[in-house]
Image (cartoon, rainbow, N blue to C red):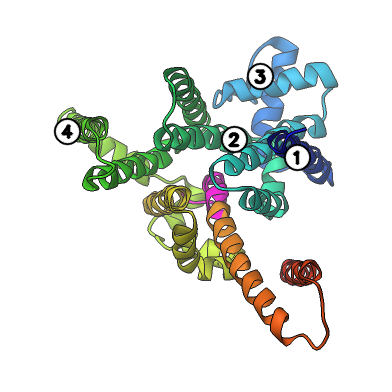
Amino acid sequence: MSKLQLHQYQKLLIAAGLFFGSLIIFSFNIHHGLYVDELYHLLPARSLLLDGTLAVGNGEYLRAEFYTRYIALLFSVFGESVAVARYSSVLAVSVLLVSMYLFLYKMVGHKEALLASLAFIIMPSSIYLAQFIRFYALHQLFFFIGAMSFLYLVVNPLSFVKRTTLVIVSLVSLGAASYLQVTTLIACVALATWFVLYLCFKVSNASTRSKEHVCLLVLVAVSGIGFTLLLGLQGHLGSLISDFRYATPWSAKNVDNYLFYHQLLRYQYPSFWLFFPFACLVALVSKPKPAFFFICLFSISLILFSLGGMKDERYIIFLYPYFIGIWSICLVYLLGKLRELMLATLSTNLPFSLSTAAQSKLVSVLILFGGCFVLLG
């Protein structure tokens, strides 16, 4: 067996382990009490099986109808229960976890992919989303596949067949995400901004400039300006801004709280949020292309969501994989430097002799112990 084949088998084995491990973790306490919002899919799904309607009380719940029909299908196969419905989200988040590992393995590195996946699987928001009968888990999965396919399409030279395939996958995935959650369009603005900045960097550098990049940049700029002018001339721009700033009564108190998500992240992940700007700088030094993509997508989206009317953690959970991606790149780089420093120190200052292999293992154990201590703390 060649070394390449061995790496492929190792990658697939880890991916399978992550998938089945996440299924087990997300299945713990899956029978917990109902959230009120879960009834928006449970009741119409039961109604579909009874009389073919999406009835909820005296009306119908039509939002994300295909997801409700998916829940009804699960009921028809496995029986009606809250746990069965919740497994729709368990499966979605588990598939997302595997997708994270495989995409990051391909575009960033093995260590970063494994660290990001392990961090994602233990995040409270991941567990919450995996046990919530709503479309947010599927939305996060579709957006991640669409965004990462777009990144791979843009930054890699590909054959016509691969490029066409990725265009279709990206458009279909982002379209599905937009169907489930209209706020996907906010993140798409962040995607477009990254794309424009990426093309500007390419065009501004004589060694990377090409006619294709120049034409794409002009096309994107003209399309963006033209589309904005068209919306303004037809009078839709004002209504879009009004919709963007709208908030239901339960969320009205945070309409003008532009620091809502900053305060949320500072409370949820105090250390990681405090040092996030530092993590961004280190990530850019270590892996510039994926780091710049993650930073643009997460930061620009977060700023835009902060300006919007409706605010809740569930609206930005789909951005967390990119937050984790930035930190995984940063930590792998810093731990690598720490390892080098510790090995250099041990080789000259140990009161007893150890082989190079033994020193390497000792350093790895110490770093692993430190990481576990931080997580448990």
| Residue at image location 54% in from the left, 27% down from the top | 63
Q: Quadrant of the N terminus?
A: top right
Range drawn in magenta:
310-323
Q: Amino acid at mark 2?
A: Leu
| Residue at image location 57% in from the left, 62% down from the top | 333
Q: Is residue 96 above or below residue 114?
A: above
Q: Whole-Å distance between the Cαs marked 1 and 2?
A: 24 Å
Q: Label 3 belongs to which residue?
A: 69
> Closest to the observer: 231 or 250?
231
Q: Amino acid at mark 4?
A: Leu
Q: Is residue 58 visible?
A: no
**Disc 1 packing (10 Å; few <14; some 14–19; many ≥20):** few
**Residue 10: which disc?**
1
Viewer-side label of 1, 3: 1
**Residue 229: which disc?**
4
Q: Whole-Å distance between the Cαs marked 2 and 4?
A: 33 Å
**Residue 141: which disc?**
2
Callout 4–callout 3 Cβ contact below 8 Å: no
From the image, give the main secondary structure of the stretch colored magenta.
Answer: helix
Callout 1–callout 2 Cβ contact below 8 Å: no
Tell me residue 199's x, y (percent).
29, 41
Q: Secondary structure at mark 2?
A: helix
Mark 2 or mark 3: whose residue is earlier in sequence = 3
Viewer-side label of 1, 2: 1
Q: Secondary structure at mark 3?
A: helix
Viewer-side label of 2, 3: 2
Q: Amino acid at mark 3?
A: Arg
